Image: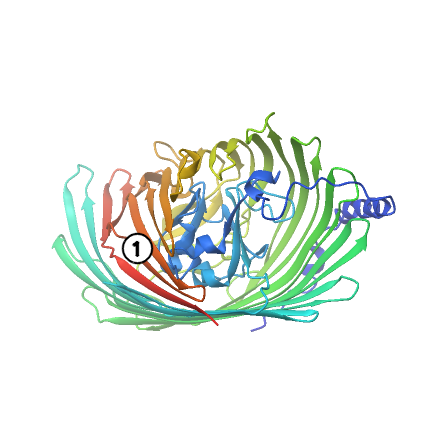
Amino acid sequence: MHLPATANAASTHRLPLRPALLAALLGTAFSADAQQEPATVEVRGSADAYDARRDDTASKIVVRQEDLLKYGDTSVVEALKRVPGVTVSGSGRNSEVRMRGLGSGYTQILIDGERAPTGFSIDSLSPEVIERIEVMRVAVAEFSTQAIAGTINIVLKKAVKPGQRSFKLGHVRGAAANTPDASLQLSDRRGRLAYSLSASASRPQSSEHSRTLERLLDADGNVTGLRGIDTDIAYDSQFLTLTPRLTWTFAEGDTLTSQTVYNFYRYKSDAFSRDDILQGPDTSLTPRAQQRDSIWRMLREELNWVHKFGGGVKLDAKLSGMYTRVSTNANSTGVVPGAPAFTVVEPADGWERGVTTVGKLSSTASAGHVLAVGWDAGHSTHDAVNYKRRFPVPGRPPIDDERYALEVSRAAFYAQDEWSITPRWSLYLGARWEGILVRTEGNTFDTAHARSRIWSPLLQTLYKLPGDTGQQLRFALSRTSKAPTLLSLLPLRFASTDSSQFNPDLAGNPNLRPEIAVGFDAGYEHHWKTGGLWSVSVSQRRIRDYTRNVLTFADGRWTSMPVNSGDATTRGLELEAKLPLKALIDTGLALNLNASLSRNWSTVDAVPGPDNRLDAQTPLSATLGADYTSGRLTTGGTFVFKNGGHVRVLRDQALYQSVRRDLDLYALWQFNPRLQLRLAASNLLAQDRERASDFVFPGAGSQHTQTLTPSHRSVRATLQMKF
């Protein structure tokens, strides 16, 4: 779908490229360094002894694939809920991964260092195709600084093990779940050519039942209306991921790598609702049946060239192209009291095409310094059409098809220096400039532009206390941001079937500005030679131009629109411990214990308290785990706790989320080096999920809605064969 562009509209909204001068000057400095005699560089230890958590100045936690595979999870989201400092809200495609308890864009999710395309769900990624996950509490200049809460970088498999061939077959079974899955890993080397293929497929099927109770009260607190709603939903999804990779090593040492990612995702849901009017008149417009069928496809190709100039200077450049398409068909059938039944059919199609170039020029020629400058630029187009068909809806005018398109141009330049001042003290200095231009046009609104420029200075430092104690201190200062989502910038109204304060129409706002946060992180770590760890860290972010959704009522319909609304503050405390039993007593028992605790506080200035927290922030989360190995048997378990509570999101609206307690267990038996069986049990406590919402009509009464959704236990069996 192509929309006619406004003449010369884009020509007056180009991104300034002045920060490129900084990159050019630093690049010249690198060339000068390369002509000098190479300096002696301190080597901290062998590759096996190196620990990024302990040794990197820029703090990060690296989760290896073997940790992701412990419980036989079929999606990376399920594995992430056990990572210290990370919480997962929702389930399935509606899952949201959070750091510091914050979601909705505060936590940046990257795939191989780049943002995932619009509509991509990391729930579709299997741990089988992932090499590692990097959890970064503080931003670094090399990656986008749109990371107020932090960054989770998912690195796809790159390591080539000659002659590796393995196949996994698994199945998840529960009272309301049935998921078969399979994965294949192949890699080898032929002379200068190395190749690998990771493939995974699964078909999750599940169902859920929920009971909602809606209560209306007048200004005196008397109940005037009471309605119960029973909803049954059946889900059927299909996932397929292919990641072939080819690497050619030239005689001079250069490498050229082709990385292809193909992702297919189909999501189907079938919901049916039944109303039970317990008190008061039936005046609502309620969908009785809803079906949704969405197909999402992505193809991404990346070429990566690495060239070593000599003298410690290296160029790492990437060029990638991406294409996605999503097709959705949604049908709703309902009734209006006293009127015939109606049907709403809303098919939609969307496309995204983009090209990106990323590069880094680094130098280790200066004694004690690892210098780097780089760029990240791209252009993408997003086209969509929503077909509207209503047959008929009483009291509703017909709606024409909606067509819209977005063009996104972005450019970023950065410089950073990792400086080993002394053997005990290291300093990371970085700065990143990012510019984004979004152009929107459609057949129901005027063309609009949104532009942002963000300058992010960054500092991190690591100091190792005297003596061979393993104790060290960290401190960081950062300026980060949260950019508006593309859909939030569209000047469109997305109508809900039943417009209410709990299910309003959604409207975009092309005048939204990015949120800007300035903050600090400080921490203490104690690393033991036996592999143990104890750490504590504190943090604070002061956020300017905080974005919140404002609810309005006009012409008989409720509308929610994002607006910039003052400032907000968030603070956090994180504790983590890893304790091998041999660190306490002299024993050969291979028992490892781990625990973490995260406590978060936040306030939104524009919303009166109490409980005026950011984005329904999770106030408290904790994990407790153990792993034990004896011969061929490895067993373990993890308990995850996530507190809920009330959140005041508007002056007249508050939400409630129940406490979550999850207990998972696993056992791995290795028959021989080529065959192993993994068994796991999830959600053993089977705790029901509860959520509620309260809305006050000033001077007229209030409405309370409470929903209870039972959850179920499930078991997994995974057989892995190497051949």
144 relative to 530, above or below: below
Q: What x and y, as percent, mark residue 132? A: 52, 54
Q: How is the image coloured?
A: rainbow
Q: Nearer the viewer, residue 307 or 25?
A: 307
The amino acid on which the numbered mark 1 sits, given as a three-letter code, is Ser
Q: What x and y, as percent, mark residue 137? A: 53, 41
Q: Which residue is mark 1?
A: 682
Residue at point 37%, 40% (across, down): 621
Question: Left or right: 684 with respect to 511?
Answer: left
Q: Nearer the viewer, residue 48 or 498?
A: 48
Q: Nearer the viewer, residue 705 or 154?
A: 154
Q: Quick check: can you spot residue 107?
A: yes
Looking at the rendered image, the quarter that the N terminus falls into is bottom right
Query: Quick one: SS at disc 1?
Result: strand
Q: Residues within 10 Å of mark 1 (few under 14, many from 20)?
A: many
Q: Quadrant of residue 284?
A: bottom left
Q: What x and y, as percent, mark residue 176? A: 25, 63
Question: Left or right: 599 with respect to 659?
Answer: right
Considering every residue shown, the one lying at the far left of the view is 278
Question: Left or right: 537 with respect to 22?
Answer: left
Residue at point 74%, 39% (across, down): 369
Q: Nearer the viewer, residue 380 or 494?
A: 380
Q: Quick check: can you spot residue 243?
A: no
Q: What x and y, as percent, mark residue 659? A: 29, 43
Question: Left or right: 656 with respect to 456?
Answer: left
